[in-house]
Amino acid sequence: MKILLMGPPGAGKGSQAQRLIDEYDLAHISTGEMFRESYQRGETLGIEAMRYIKNGNLVSDDITNEIVRKRLFEDGDTKNVLLDGYPRTVKQAQALDHMLDKMNSKLTAVVNIVVDEEVILERMVGRRVCKDCGQTYHTTFKPPKVEGVCDICGGELYQRQDDKPESVRNRLNIYESKTKPIIDYYKGRGVLVNINGMQSFEAVYRDIVKAVGELS
Ligand code: ADP
Ligand code: ADP
Ligand code: ZN
């Protein structure tokens, strides 16, 4: 099974991904997380990528395709995967098709989480992330038990540089111009499903599981 999670920044992709990978036993491929982890490890790739990420710009297609290719072909079992935040351009979508062809595989479902801009902004300004385990919180919608501290590992919570208002606007523009066209790219293949993301975490999750079940 190969599921692709799409939607604007702040739509809830990462939050839903956490539960879906457990439910279906999927390898989680989040290019955003891969870049952040590489940056925290002090690697050249991550440092280079962060120059784009912090201002809300996309990392180049070549670099991004290459880290996904490595993950899919060199890193163990990738029969069942959840792609989260990749592809983000039509060029990346084409590259992914190429990789899947080579694996004799195809996408089971393209899950597009739909949310209004107002909701996106509200979610992004309140998002906090654990610097040790990457768990996501929200100051209002998913607060940790103790302010600033991760429930799971006790790590310190921080606000991503690219969640500051200056970067958020740019990310939304980039989503509209570069990422949204991918939805048309997948139309007509019978795998695309729109999910209303402006519901509780549980309701969104339930709708995704139902849609994936129908497509599997
Ligand atoms: P969000 O879910 O809030 O959009 P992500 O963690 O998926 O954030 O991505 C954070 C940033 O990492 C993006 O804004 C972009 O700069 C970079 N990035 C992640 N995935 C890609 C990709 N597929 N192509 C180019 N840049 C990417
Ligand atoms: P994405 O990966 O699409 O950028 P996240 O999963 O990181 O989105 O969610 C963005 C923010 O919104 C996080 O702070 C998260 O806790 C919160 N959030 C996600 N889904 C919901 C929801 N259904 N209701 C309320 N808050 C949500
Ligand atoms: Zn943590």
Image (cartoon, rainbow, N blue to C red):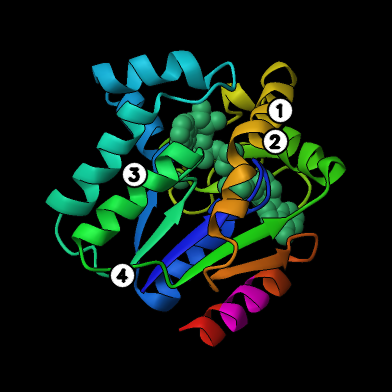
- The amino acid type of the residue labelled 1 equals Asn
Distance from mark 4 CB to nearest ligand 1 atom below 8 Å = no
For the image, the number of numbered tags is 4
Categorize mark 4 by other alpha carbons within 10 Å: few (<14), some (14-19), many (20+). some
Query: What label sits on residue 95 in the rendered view?
Result: 3
- Residue 212 percent coordinates (x, y): 53, 78
Q: Nearer the viewer, mark 4 or mark 1?
A: 1
Residue 84, placed above or below residue 61? below
Q: Which residue is mark 4?
A: 80
Residue found 58% across the figure and 64% down from its top = 111
Q: Nearer the viewer, mark 2 or mark 3?
A: 3
Residue found 62% across the figure and 37% down from its top = 128
Q: Nearer the viewer, mark 1 or mark 3?
A: 3
Seen in the image, is 78 located left or right of residue 182?
left
- The amino acid type of the residue labelled 3 equals Ala
Do we see residue 67 in this rendering? Answer: yes
The segment highlighted magenta reads: 205-211
Query: What label sits on residue 173 in the rendered view?
Result: 1
Q: Secondary structure at mark 1?
A: helix
Of the image marks 4 and 1, the number of the one nearer the N terminus:
4
The secondary structure that dominates the magenta segment is: helix
Q: Which residue is mark 2?
A: 176
